[in-house]
Amino acid sequence: MLFRWKKRSPLRRKKTSWLTPQLLGVLFVILSLALMLVFAPEKEEYPTDFLSRAMNNPIAAIQSIRNMTHTFIRNMADNFHAKAELQTLRIEMEKIQNENVELHYKLRQLENFREALNLPRTESYRTVPAIVCRRDNRMTNSFVIDRGTEAGLSINQAVMCTTGMVGRTYRLRPHAAWVQLLTDPGCTIPVYVKDTPYEGILRGREDRQGLVLTDQYLKEMGDETRTPEPGQAVFTSGVDKVFQRDLLAGYITSGANEEGLSVIPAVDFDAVKAVYVILNTVVQEEMLSLLIEED
Amino acid sequence: MISMIIFIITFFGDLIVRIVLNPGAWSPDLLLLSVLYITLNRPLGEAYLYAFLAGLCWDSVFFEIPGTHSLLFILAAMITAKLRLVIWAQFSISRLVIGVLAVVFVRFGEVIFWLSYLEYEIPLILPYKYILYGSIVTGICFMIYPMLFLPIQSILQKNTQPMIFLGR
């Protein structure tokens, strides 16, 4: 018989040992842990009983891993929070910057008002106080003031400030007026030099950096030897029947040359914040007097 | 007997390398290499016993807390025993992978234990260098390590009686 079924006896079992390599490995691991727990360094805060130490020492290793993970997650969360906080701070900074700009604008306005309150009050002629809104130096050296025809302004009226003459009105709107400064080459004013017989026309230099006294001539005052010297004041002469006499225009800075006498304005145009406009011109006064006489 | 010879050679070799040459973080874990070698070539029970004794000797010599390296070496041997089911260790690249993984595990465990025992002085400044450099060096050493025998292919022996202290 080539093949015979051979039954395996149920009593004949395969011999297996209870000591498997895996069990041996686990036993060695437990032994190592026990050694570690027994020889672990003593800490005062640690309890002395074996069970608590067995709990504490492995937990120390786990705690360090947990702390590292916690620190990592906390850093990531802090990063996100920092981004959101940065965005909030940027928005707040933008708000504060806008408020700063507004406050600066209000401060400038208040300074203008304060300077306007300190303007001199003359009883000889009517004046209108005004505040400089902005500077317009595109075509001419000029200011824009906040008073116009509604306040009684007209063209060619003298504009003054506390230190001297600023210019004249040359363009009008109901609530605004353009003031042509003395330094503009198109602005010509008849003037005289104080304590000298010299008179002439004061106009702005071509480079718009100062004034020049041109077309000088000697007035018959008897003493012809008195020539203009640096530092002497220049006043309006009122010859043109437009501006009043004796309005301070500037000071002579140097002697005569080919162009004329160099004059520095009496007013620092960059610092002017408030001005006053003299309403009545010489011609108007004369016309008024004539009308009164006719009546 | 083979395990004893390997243990004596690698143990003292490792001591010489660490104490005499003193390469710092670049020092290879030769004792761990021997544990891996025996795990790949010898029965598991022998490997676990060898790992336990080698770790205990190591802790005794370097005044570590007894049981620290024993635990780490046994766990490394267990990991290697699992790895040899899927990675055939007769190839150099396989041994490189096994060596790097085992050394990273052991050194990371060392660092964790050192950090957990806060009363001890930590014997290194940059733990990541200690882990990285050591794993590279040891992996390369294990890669060029001569395999005298064909490693045990436990896939083929899955249904057979597992060996503990028996010979091949």
Image (tube, coloured by chain):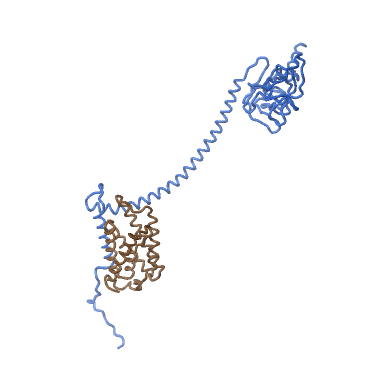
Chain colours: A blue, B brown
Residue A100 at x, y percent in the picture: 54, 33
- The answer to whether residue A225 is seen in the rendering is yes
Taking the image as shown, residue A100 lies to the left or right of residue A19, namely right
**Position of B60 relative to A205 (above/below):** below
**Position of B42 relative to A175 (above/below):** below
Residue B160 at x, y percent in the picture: 30, 73
Q: Nearer the viewer, residue A276 or A208?
A: A208
Taking the image as shown, residue B20 lies to the left or right of residue A274, namely left
Quadrant in which the N terminus of chain A is drawn = bottom left
Displayed quadrant of residue B39: bottom left
Q: Nearer the viewer, residue A4 or A227?
A: A227
Q: Nearer the viewer, residue B151 or B79?
A: B151
Residue extending furthest toward the bottom: A1
Q: Residue at x 64, y 21 (%)?
A: A163
Displayed quadrant of residue B16: bottom left
Q: Nearer the viewer, residue A217 or A119?
A: A217
Q: Residue at x 45, y 44 (%)?
A: A82
Taking the image as shown, residue B23 lies to the left or right of residue A130, namely left
Count of residue discs: 0
Quadrant in which the C terminus of chain A is drawn = top right
Q: Residue at x 56, y 31 (%)?
A: A104
Residue B50 at x, y percent in the picture: 28, 66
Displayed quadrant of residue B32: bottom left
Taking the image as shown, residue A58 lies to the left or right of residue A84, namely left
Residue A194 at x, y percent in the picture: 70, 18
